[in-house]
Image: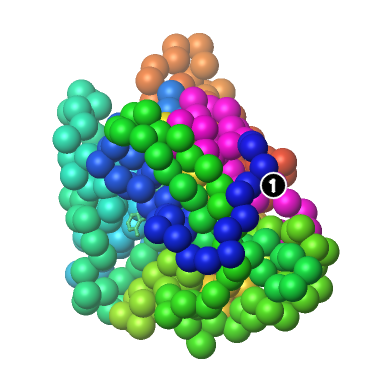
Amino acid sequence: MSEPLVKSEQLPLARFDQFVDQCLYGRSGFYATVGRAGRRGGDFVTSPEVGPLFGEVVANAIDHWWADAGSPANFTVYDVGCGPGALLRSVRRSRPERPWNLIGVDIAAAALTAEPKSGNSSDPEIQVLAELPENIEGAVVLGNELLDNMPFRIVEKVANGLNEVFVEVVGQQGEFTATEVLVPYSPTDDELSPSIAFDLPAVAAELPIGTRLPLLNDAGRWVEATLARKPAHLCLFDYGTATTAELAVRGGWLRTYRQHERGSDPYDRPGSCDITTDVPADQLPNVSSVSTQAEFLQQWGIAELVAEGKAHWQANAHAPNVAALKMRSRISESEALLDSGGLGLWNVLHWGS
Ligand SMILES: C[S@@+](CC[C@H](N)C(=O)[O-])C[C@H]1O[C@@H](n2cnc3c(N)ncnc32)[C@H](O)[C@@H]1O
């Protein structure tokens, strides 16, 4: 990346979150064009796309929450940022008998609907909305790798305070050049809400000069607005840390993905790669519980599902059919989902009892 320009006054530039918004969700952005988030063979593989096991374990958790609610005949589960819908399809296949309304929500719903279907007629159809409805009281709201994909700001500690990253984008469709510009940070009216304890000046005061950190205002406000609608459970799976300070010191939180590879520079061919951040939990409303993905999956019975898969495979290995092969694949899926150097370390943020 070239040295950033430093400007002392506000110029008609895109703030980093506006730049991310355009790069990801603009008309010629990542999701409208090349984006293959979550899809096998795509730019990265998410837990629901590893295979059906993730959804089968999540279905165990939903079953418990549904029983807790008195096993109502009407019970809705939303998957926000559902992408191609793998999670809810696995949940449906795992519990076809349950009277659950499974509804996907994705800001890129129009692009997803326009996609060709998988061609597998046994795939359960999942309705996908562009927005979470107002009335979600008592529902379960899930989101896998959602918050990391919401536009975020970046600030950098300097000797006399904080600078904020803006981006100057020059060029025509598909031929953009993006250059970073640092502008003195000024709090604006889309700061984190007072109900979120994160104190930027206090956190920045403890950091070395030159340290950068992400501000997840959109994600914080989205969680707050969702909780205000009183779902019974909000359960979000994402990469991140407990605190912003931890993330800032560790670095490496700005992630770009292109064709399975971690990229390094979000300014390289804007719109051609995914731009995401690790999610620090202290920039969100207080969570009821945080666990790692490995802990969550163990709590909800992954070991039993894998043992069942192994036993089924062993009993059928002499004449394997598709069902037996699927059961065997639980073994490799669980290794990927529990990987202590990868998906197993993701955080599961749960609001609800
Ligand atoms: C990284 S992909 C994850 C897809 C899927 N959950 C998975 O795990 O395979 C993130 C998805 O979140 C969607 N998204 C981002 N912000 C959103 C928002 N505010 N509301 C709904 N969907 C959103 C994006 O369009 C994208 O499909």
Q: Amino acid at mark 1?
A: Gly
Q: Secondary structure at mark 1?
A: loop
Q: Is residue 67 left or right of residue 303?
A: left
Between residues 129 and 11, which one lies in front from this camera angle?
A: 11
Residue 39 visible here: no
Q: Residue at x 46, y 47 (%)?
A: 168
**Is residue 294 highlighted in magenta?**
no
Question: Residue at horizontal 45%, vertical 12%?
Answer: 319
Q: Does the segment drawn in magenta span residue 257? A: yes
**5 displayed left or right of 58:** right
At which x and y percent is residue 132? 26, 65
Dot 1 alpha-carbon crowd within 10 angstroms: few under 14, some 14 to 19, many 20 or more: few
Q: Is residue 171 above or below residue 129?
A: above
Magenta-colored span: 247-271
**Observer-nearest of 19 and 167:** 167
Residue matched to label 1: 252
- In the depicted view, which residue is nearer to us: 61 or 197? 197
Residue 170, relative to residue 282: is it above or below? above
What residue is shown at x 72% (from left), y 44% (from top)? 340
Colouring of the image: rainbow
The residue drawn where x is 74% and y is 65% is 158
Q: Does any atom of ligand 1 lie closer than 8 Å to the CB of label 1?
A: no
